[in-house]
Image: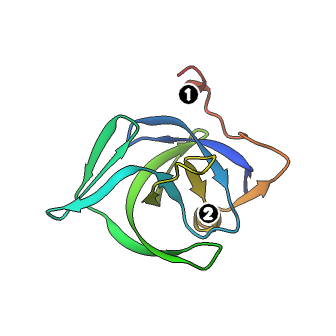
Amino acid sequence: MNIVGWRELFHFVDLGLVNVPAKIDTGAYSNVLHCDEIEEIDGKLHFRIGEKDFVYEKFKTINVKSSFGHEQERYAILTSVILGNIPYKLYVSLNNRDNMQYPMLIGRRFLQKFNFIVDVNKECLNINDFFKKV
């Protein structure tokens, strides 16, 4: 078993993002990452994170149900992340999270797939020494 705190820092290899704070949410099933200007144009997914624009040719749409029971269709991408010193592949849905405290949410799907348990009394247990300097 691997242990994560209630909050961790993720590094998105494919997107070039370092130290993205994520709340670990065992009540959520899937993962979500904050993005702006998300749209499909000519079969390609375009989105913005901060000042960076991205275009993905491979993506899918998923239905996400909020804790309030509202369903929403979202785009999702398969991407590579590093947590601690270990790389993982995960699907992350894209959504505007301006009103949320954390730009990323990690749900049960990731935790179960990679055998994580959550220590709710700890945070940032999996910090990679290399990225501490960035």
Q: Position of residue 89 (x, y in %)?
A: 46, 55
Q: Which residue lies furthest to the front in this view?
A: 99
Q: In this view, does 86 lie to the left or right of 14?
A: right
Give the residue drawn at x 46%, y 74%.
72
Label 1 element class? helix
**In which image quadrant can residue 132 be found?**
top right
Q: Which of 60 and 38 is in front in this view?
A: 38
**In which image quadrant can residue 66 be found?**
bottom right
Q: Which of marks 1 and 2 is nearer the N terminus?
A: 2
Q: Nearer the viewer, residue 70 or 106?
A: 70
Label 2 element class? loop
Q: In this view, does 52 lie to the left or right of 70?
A: left
Amino acid marked by disc 2: Gly
Give the residue drawn at x 70%, y 65%.
26
Q: Where is residue 22 in the image (x, y as percent from the top left)?
A: 61, 47
- Number of numbered discs: 2
Q: In the rendered structure, are the residues bearing label 1 and label 2 in contact, judged by CB atoms less than 8 Å apart?
A: no
Label 2 crowd bin: few (<14), some (14–19), many (20+), radius 10 Å: some
Q: Which residue lies furthest to the top in this view?
A: 133
Amino acid marked by disc 1: Phe
Q: Name the residue under label 1.
A: 131
The nearer-to-camera label among 1 and 2 is: 2
Give the residue drawn at x 67%, y 62%.
115
Q: Name the residue under label 2.
A: 107
